[in-house]
């Protein structure tokens, strides 16, 4: 089954860029991604720019509205994702728990709806 | 006659059949329907002298046949097969039970597989990715075989609401890929914890109904005790499983004495101990011994069971081994430092070492900032009782009053009103 792991965290959570802690965490991200790859579980995974770069698009009364900012203002924001292919929710949550952000953020595990 | 044979078999065979079919089919709904069909057929067909030699095997084979019928009949067979886990498909292909000629009276049992299947069903129903309400409802439906209507009645909700809850749970199981398997060893402890929590919750729900009219909903207590026994039997080396079974047996032994002829709650100290169920006490004691033998590790259920056993073994409230109970509460508090456990400890301490010691423990608790206790009527009632024994009438009076303001139960209210009258007269009955 395919699952989307959605990575949420507060902007000020986790190590600050430029610090040795941040550099160490980057190594953890690389190692984690490689682990997923070697297990044959990785479909894709990307980090996202911050919500200050977000534009939200809606069509209302036939008009397209583009507004600055994320869809919902929340403390924890979506910062990246992994799409993985594993057997079941237990394996998916096991991978989710290994994500370097899990100690200070949240990983939402969502099964992908298989169409057709 | 036939009805009762089938009814007796139901308790034992239902979870085995559903568990096996869930593994083989990977479809909870289909397993449930097929098992139900098999029992209906048994009720129709079996009569005196016309009962199969191995009724369990007969039911299993019949249920499998009905499942095949449904799959064949189903227009969207293709979609159903897609939903099945890959290993379930292999099972279907290799077990050969699509060959319809299998004789229900000659099928092999595999005990080990059955243990695994039943555990897988229980662990699946109590999977942590389901919410607690769903875990409870699914366990009662799938493992205990209660009907949706029965579960709804037990939880004081409508059948439609409960049906919706079950459908939502089953949809999540299917869409999120919740496995019905026995967890790996490194996961087993955590997963068992949620299974035991579900069983405990079913028991407390049955035991402590908020409405005084049905103070004890016995059906749920029976189901919980049966489940705890089953899990303890299936996992004999897990001490907390045996301990929960011990706790529920020992606690349920007091059921008949817990409510008087007017349906009012009777406190432990005032219960007629001759009405306690000694078969259950014996069963509880044996389960506790199993737990002790399985491991020296002492968990929260084990401590609670030891407390329950201390009560069960005392001929009356006075001669209870209160010192032992205080020790158990000390260790329980170390595991779960909650105000309620500390409160129970203080109450036991007042029995073991006198009301002054109990009162000091209660007031220390209050000073430690457990202000939530002040919203808990038992805190005030316990405090009032200790003050009464110390003949500090003025303070006792205000503590009884505080308890009265918080109570919602008629029998408690009457008890407290009587005590207030006693305190107002300074201990002199009118």
Image (cartoon, coloured by chain):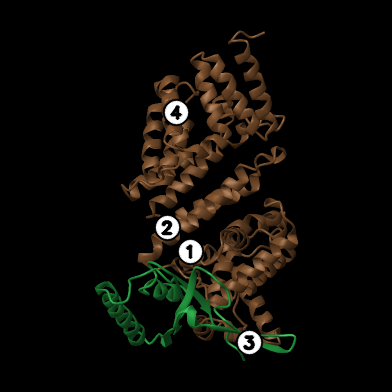
- Closer to us: B67 or B107: B67
Q: Is residue B334 left or right of residue B164?
A: left
Q: Chain of mark 1?
A: B
Element class at badge 1? helix
Query: Label 1 belongs to which residue?
Result: B119
Of pointers 4 and 2, the one earlier in the residue sequence: 2
- Same chain? Circles 4 and 1: yes
> How dense is the environment of label 1, judged by Cα within 10 Å: few (below 14), some, or many (20 and up)?
many
Query: Label 3 belongs to which residue?
Result: B79
Q: CA distance from mark 1 to mark 3?
A: 28 Å
- Closer to us: A86 or B92: A86
Of pointers 3 and 4, the one earlier in the residue sequence: 3
Chain coloured green in the rendered structure: A
Residue B144 on image: x %, y %: 60, 58
Residue at (69, 61) in percent of width and height: B162
Q: CA distance from mark 4 to mark 1?
A: 46 Å
Q: Chain of mark 2?
A: B
Please tell me whether residue A92 is drawn above or below residue B307 in the rendered image: below
Q: CA distance from mark 1 to mark 2?
A: 9 Å
Label 4 or label 1, whichever lies nearer to me, is 4
Residue A56 on image: x %, y %: 58, 83
> How dense is the environment of label 3, judged by Cα within 10 Å: few (below 14), some, or many (20 and up)?
few
Query: Label 4 belongs to which residue?
Result: B363
């Amino acid at each position: 089954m395919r699952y989307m792991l959605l990575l949420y965290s507060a902007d000020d959570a986790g190590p600050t860029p430029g610090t040795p802690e941040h550099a160490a965490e980057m190594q953890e991200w690389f190692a984690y991604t490689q682990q997923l790859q070697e297990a044959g579980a990785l479909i894709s995974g990307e980090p996202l720019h911050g919500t200050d770069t977000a534009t939200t698009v809606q069509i209302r009364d036939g008009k397209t509205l583009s507004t600055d900012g994320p869809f919902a203002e929340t403390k924890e924001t979506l910062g990246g994702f992994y799409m993985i292919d594993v057997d079941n929710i237990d394996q998916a949550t096991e991978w989710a728990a290994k994500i370097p952000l899990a100690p200070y953020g949240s990983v939402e595990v969502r099964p992908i709806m298989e169409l057709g | 006659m036939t009805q009762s044979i089938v009814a007796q078999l139901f308790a034992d065979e239902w979870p085995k059949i559903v568990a096996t079919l869930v593994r083989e089919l990977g479809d909870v709904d289909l397993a449930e329907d097929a098992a139900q069909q098999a029992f209906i057929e048994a009720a129709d067909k079996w009569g005196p002298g016309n009962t199969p030699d191995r009724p369990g095997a007969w039911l299993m084979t019949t249920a499998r046949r009905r499942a095949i019928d449904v799959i064949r009949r189903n227009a969207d067979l293709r979609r159903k097969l897609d939903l099945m886990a890959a290993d379930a498909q292999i099972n279907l292909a290799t077990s050969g039970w699509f060959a319809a000629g299998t004789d229900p009276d000659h099928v092999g049992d595999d005990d080990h597989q059955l243990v695994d299947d039943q555990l897988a069903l229980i662990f699946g129903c109590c999977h942590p990715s389901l919410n607690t309400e769903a875990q409870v409802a699914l366990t009662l439906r799938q493992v205990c075989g209660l009907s949706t209507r029965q579960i709804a009645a037990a939880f004081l909700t409508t059948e439609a609401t409960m049906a919706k809850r079950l459908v939502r749970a089953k949809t999540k199981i299917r869409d999120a890929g919740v496995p019905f398997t026995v967890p790996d060893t490194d996961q087993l402890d955590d997963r068992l914890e949620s299974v035991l929590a579900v069983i405990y919750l079913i028991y407390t729900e049955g035991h402590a109904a908020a409405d005084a009219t049905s103070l004890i909903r016995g059906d749920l207590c029976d189901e919980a005790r049966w489940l705890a026994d089953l899990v303890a039997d299936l996992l004999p080396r897990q001490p907390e499983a045996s301990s929960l079974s011990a706790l529920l047996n020992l606690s349920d032994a007091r059921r008949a004495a817990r409510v008087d002829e007017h349906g009012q709650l009777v406190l432990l100290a005032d219960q007629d101990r001759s009405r306690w169920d000694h078969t259950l006490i014996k069963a509880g004691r044996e389960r506790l011994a199993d737990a002790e033998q399985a491991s020296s590790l002492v968990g929260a259920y084990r401590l609670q069971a030891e407390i329950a056993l201390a009560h069960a073994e005392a001929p009356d409230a006075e001669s209870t081994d209160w010192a032992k109970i205080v020790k158990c509460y000390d260790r329980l508090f170390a595991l779960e430092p909650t105000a309620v456990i500390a409160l129970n400890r203080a109450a036991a301490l007042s029995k073991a070492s006198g009301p002054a010691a109990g009162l000091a423990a209660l007031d220390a608790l209050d000073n430690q900032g457990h202000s939530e206790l002040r919203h808990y009527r038992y805190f005030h009632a316990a405090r009032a009782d200790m003050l009464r024994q110390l003949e500090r009438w003025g303070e006792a009076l205000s503590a009884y009053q505080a308890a009265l303001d918080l109570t919602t139960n008629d029998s408690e209210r009457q008890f407290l009103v009587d005590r207030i009258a006693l305190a107002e007269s300074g201990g002199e009955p009118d």
